[in-house]
Amino acid sequence: MLITLLLFLLSAVTIYLACEYFVNGIEWTGHHFRFSQSATGSLLAALGTALPECIVTLTALLMGDAPAQQQIGMGAALGGPLVLATLGYGAVGLLLLLCMNPEHRTIAGEVQRETARDQAWFVGIFLLATLLGTAAFTGKSWLAPLFVLAYLAYARRELTRADSHEAPLPEPLKLDPAAEIPALGKVLVQTLAALTAVALAAQMFVHQLEDMGELLGLSPVLAALLLSPVATEMPELMNVLIWVRQGKQRLALANIAGAMMIQGTIPKAFCLLFTPWLLDGTMMLSSLVTLLAVLLLWWGFRRGRM
């Protein structure tokens, strides 16, 4: 148990340190490709850090067609949005309240409206996935491409969105702090190296959390629904904490929204292809909690009260 806890803490610290380099590199990547801050957070950062959760889901589904294995894959697909809609946004709020001066806690009205639009997209897609999980019918797997197309439509919208003001230059590239505008090659090297370190540390984090779940007597489905997503979404949570600490709420909120859109579409497409996609009581409860959290967020962001 002691070794598990030590490896758990070591992997968490490694994820945080690697994310410091990743968010720095991803900001410069977005700058070089002239992405808006919203697109940088919701597409570039989210695509990189959401990969572990997608891989966990796909691996669980492809390891076998046994019902228990399918349940684990489905639990992982539902756990990601649950963690982001609750712990992800909760981390932003707590950090703003506890660590920021009152004048730095304000989230700009434009950012709140953008986030509300992202929540509306997610609610529509996730509600459809939940309703599909309540009924069995022939040809359900043919609906999988719809979720992929929904994500592509979201990505296209993000790429065409422009910031209303010019974004400031990111902090100096950690790999080349003397350069005012670092070379794209160095930016990509730092970003990919940091992402590799994040992925390896996240894998260790997942294994230690799974061992802790076994020690606590949790079933594999509950571990996949509650513990594994906390581990695989740890890079997103670290990105968010770093960006909020730097006063970059737009990037932090866009990162969570983009990751939720990935988790709400790509893993669901995998589940529709490889499972009957029928939700049991525990999964339905997690889906309802996720929807309730996102609806509350949508209401607050839409009215500018967050």
Image: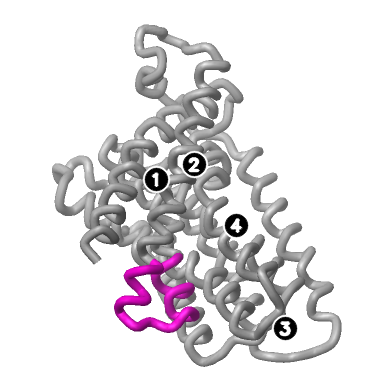
Q: Amino acid at mark 4?
A: Ile
Which residue corresponds to the image point at 41% horizontal and 20% vertical from the top-left?
A: 169
Left or right relative to 98: residue 205: right
Q: Secondary structure at mark 4?
A: helix
As measured in the structure, the alpha-carbon distance from the residue carrying label 1 to the one carrying label 2 is 7 Å
Spot occupied by residue 96 in the image (x, y as percentages of width and height): 22, 50
Left or right relative to 57: residue 215: left
As measured in the structure, the alpha-carbon distance from the residue carrying label 4 to the one carrying label 1 is 23 Å
Q: Secondary structure at mark 2?
A: helix
Magenta range: 210-228
Which residue corresponds to the image point at 53% horizontal and 23% vertical from the top-left?
A: 189
- Which label belongs to residue 55? 4
Circle 3 sits on which residue?
276
As measured in the structure, the alpha-carbon distance from the residue carrying label 3 to the one carrying label 1 is 35 Å
Circle 1 sits on which residue?
252
Which residue corresponds to the image point at 49% horizontal and 30% vertical from the top-left?
A: 193
Which mark lies nearer to you, 4 or 2?
A: 4
Q: Secondary structure at mark 3?
A: loop
Mark 4 nearby-residue class (10 Å; few <14, some 14–19, many ≥20)? some
Is residue 112 among the parts visible in the rendering? no
Q: Amino acid at mark 3?
A: Pro
Circle 2 sits on which residue?
41
Spot occupied by residue 298 in the image (x, y as percentages of width and height): 45, 65
Q: Of marks 3 and 4, which one's residue comes earlier in the chain?
A: 4
- Classify 34 as above or below 247: above
Which mark lies nearer to you, 4 or 1?
A: 4
Left or right relative to 138: residue 110: left
Which mark lies nearer to you, 3 or 1?
A: 3
Q: Amino acid at mark 1?
A: Ala
